[in-house]
Amino acid sequence: VACLTTALVAARSGLRVVVCSPSDLNGRGWAEVSLLQRDRLHQTRTLLGDDVLTGYLQIAMDARLWLDEFLAGPGADVLRRSVTAGGWVADGHHAVLLHQEAQALRLADVTARFDDESELPFPVRPVLTLPDQLLIERDSYVTALRRAVTDAGARVLTEAQLVSGSTHEFVVGEGENRVQILASRVVVADGVAAPTRSPLPRGSAIREYAVELECEHPIDNLWYGLEEAFTVTPGFTPGTIIVSGAAHAGTIPRESEQAFGALTEFARQRFGTEDALRRWSRTYYTSTDHLPLVGPAGVLAPFIFVLGGIDRWDLLTGTAAGLQLGRYLNGTDTELPWSPVHARGGSPKAIVARLRAWLPGPR
């Protein structure tokens, strides 16, 4: 999403754009577009301060407006639904976290409401709700975004493998599919952690699992459970739900059956469901300070830009990241607030946290 958004903004401004992907561009499952993101906002506020968080929220809300305009445009045949995002907890500690999230949202004049009512079939209290958020079917959105990119004049190469590359010249593909690309700017998207040998926020890979199950109880909204770190959303078809979570560091091997079993058992105990209809997993990347990494890869490679650390909210933060970089490349904007090679927050706590993430040895 971040890569295609960058390509669309750049191509619409008249730049020549080539998108190279090692596989077909698609997605799977529902994607959440919500400012309520578990306890991420509170963590960013604690680490980087009010000003950085306010900037993040403003950028995210601008990205939501762009998404709304894109979805309302011609040819955007995207499956989507408006939902209320909710955070549900079962003890005092997690109630405090939700209060901190609500306070963080108020920095952008966004009011989340505590409510004793819940559509979930088990008792939860309190419930923090935020209306008018979105669920978007990922594959139809990526398809529409790719179509818009090609309509804007960009070239999309799938199954593209980098054969060789120098400073500004790249050869992609073999035989008849061999393409030579002369590039003044190169964007490396998806999974870039951070430049090495620099006190910058490092990224980490997180692997998450999901199951879709039949459920007699209708679920129409998006629910986060901070206690189990599980997410419950409506399923692909009526009468189903999707439960995702069981996340772990992507570098740590884990039996998939164990993760899928944990999700299925959670759903069985809470919703009375049976075996899963579908199962899948995906890997996403997050940075140490919970902000995406959008900007030059390093001071020695100013023509190479990275898009990484997008986290699981890729349709919102990925869109925001793509808009930033696309507008920077076409000259509309002159700043990259999520740049990995510039200060992302000036508090001593933030500086110490970045140094600890970079320095070897025990934390």
Image (cartoon, rainbow, N blue to C red):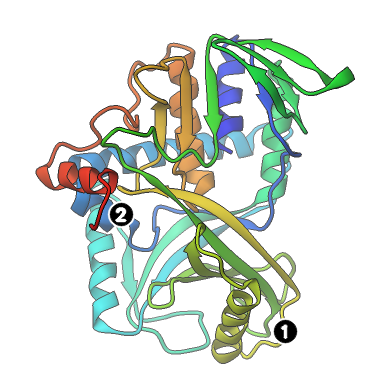
Left or right, residue 252 beside residue 169: left
Amino acid type, callout 1:
Asp
The residue positioned 43% from the left and 68% from the top of the image is 86
Quadrant of the image containing the N terminus = top right
Find residue 189 and report its image quarter.
top right
Q: Residues within 10 Å of mark 2 (few under 14, many from 20)?
A: many
> Is residue 355 shown left or right of residue 57?
left
Q: Toward the viewer: 239 or 44?
A: 44
Q: Position of residue 93 (x, y in %)?
A: 24, 78
| Direction front: furthest residue | 361
Is 155 drawn above or below residue 229 in the view shown?
above
Residue count near mark 1 (Cα–Cα under 10 Å), binned few <14, some 14–19, many ≥20: some
Q: Residue 11 sits in which quadrant? A: top right
Q: Position of residue 110 (x, y in %)?
A: 30, 52
In-front residue for pair 106/14? 14
Residue matched to label 1: 275
Q: The C terminus is located in which quarter?
A: bottom left
| Circle 2: residue type | Leu
Q: To which residue does mark 2 refer?
A: 41
